[in-house]
């Protein structure tokens, strides 16, 4: 009997060698959330022809005839969107990596992964467009927390001092293309939100 096949579409969050001749890839999908898959490599140099970090891909997944049903292997893949611009600036790359970690740490058990998947794609595309990485990340984790039902507006935002509350409202509500907030002020707001989320919620960022 042939191995069952399914198709998975999502963003590549990580890829690393796993043992001899295989690659471990984590993908975030709007249908299945965080998914771990493996790709067998014909040679050590074959990884260059595989999906890169932050690529949007469509994968054909097969399971081995024996062994755990939880292990999926990539039989074929197709590139949908590539984002090489993310590697052309330290702050952009660091922010994209932080987004990857956010989804790897918190994306495994989301009840509704589709809204989180759209947030991820929008944030990565905003980085590609050259918008402020700090503002992109702040908006991303704020909206991620709201999607997951945490009271960031009712609890975190209300707890801020008046001047920082006004700065936070501007950064979070103004479109990135129109934002003129000073970077240092945005960084302070981001750190405040990160500390609150790590202390008051189950999210880790």
Image (spheres, rainbow, N blue to C red):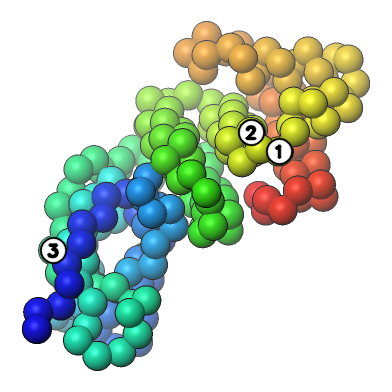
Residue tagged by mark 3? 76
Residue 142: x and y in percent read: 64, 33
Residue 105: x and y in percent read: 58, 58
Residue tagged by mark 2? 146
Whether residue 7 sits left or right of residue 100 in the image: it is left
- For the view shown, which residue lies furthest in the front direction? 1
For numbered disc 3, what is the local secondary structure? Answer: strand
Q: CA distance from mark 3 to mark 2?
A: 35 Å
Which of the marked residues, 3 or 2, is nearer the chain's N terminus?
3
Q: CA distance from mark 1 to mark 2?
A: 5 Å
Residue 148 lies, with reference to residue 62, above or below; the image says: above
Residue 110: x and y in percent read: 53, 51
Choose mark 1 or mark 3, whichever is in front: 1
Residue 66 lies, with reference to residue 90, above or below; the image says: below
Q: CA distance from mark 1 to mark 3?
A: 38 Å
Q: Quadrant of residue 153?
A: top right
Residue placed most toward the observer, 112 or 176: 112
The label on residue 150 is 1
Q: Are marks 1 and 2 in contact (CB under 8 Å)?
A: yes
Q: Residue at x 54, y 30 (%)?
A: 136
For numbered disc 1, what is the local secondary structure? Answer: loop
- Local crowd at mark 1 within 10 Å, few (<14), some, or many (≥20)? some
- Local crowd at mark 3 within 10 Å, few (<14), some, or many (≥20)? few
Q: Residue at x 52, y 14 (%)?
A: 175
């Amino acid at each position: 009997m042939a191995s069952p096949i399914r198709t998975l579409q999502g963003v590549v969050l990580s890829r690393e060698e796993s043992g001899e001749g295989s690659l471990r890839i984590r993908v975030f999908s709007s249908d299945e959330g965080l998914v771990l898959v493996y790709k067998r490599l014909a040679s050590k140099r074959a990884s260059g022809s595989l999906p890169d970090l932050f690529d949007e891909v469509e994968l054909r997944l097969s399971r081995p005839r024996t062994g755990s049903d939880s292990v999926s292997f990539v039989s074929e893949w197709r590139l949908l969107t590539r984002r090489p611009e993310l590697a052309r600036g330290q702050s952009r790359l660091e922010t994209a990596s932080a987004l990857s970690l956010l989804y790897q740490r918190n994306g495994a058990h989301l009840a509704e992964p589709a809204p989180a998947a759209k947030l991820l794609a929008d944030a990565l595309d905003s980085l590609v467009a050259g918008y402020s990485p700090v503002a992109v990340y702040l908006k991303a984790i704020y909206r991620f927390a709201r999607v997951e039902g945490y009271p960031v507006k009712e609890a975190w935002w209300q707890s801020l001092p008046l001047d920082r509350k006004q700065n936070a409202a501007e950064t979070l509500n103004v479109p990135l293309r129109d934002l003129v907030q000073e970077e240092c002020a945005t960084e302070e707001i981001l750190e405040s939100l990160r500390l609150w989320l790590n202390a008051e919620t189950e999210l880790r960022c």
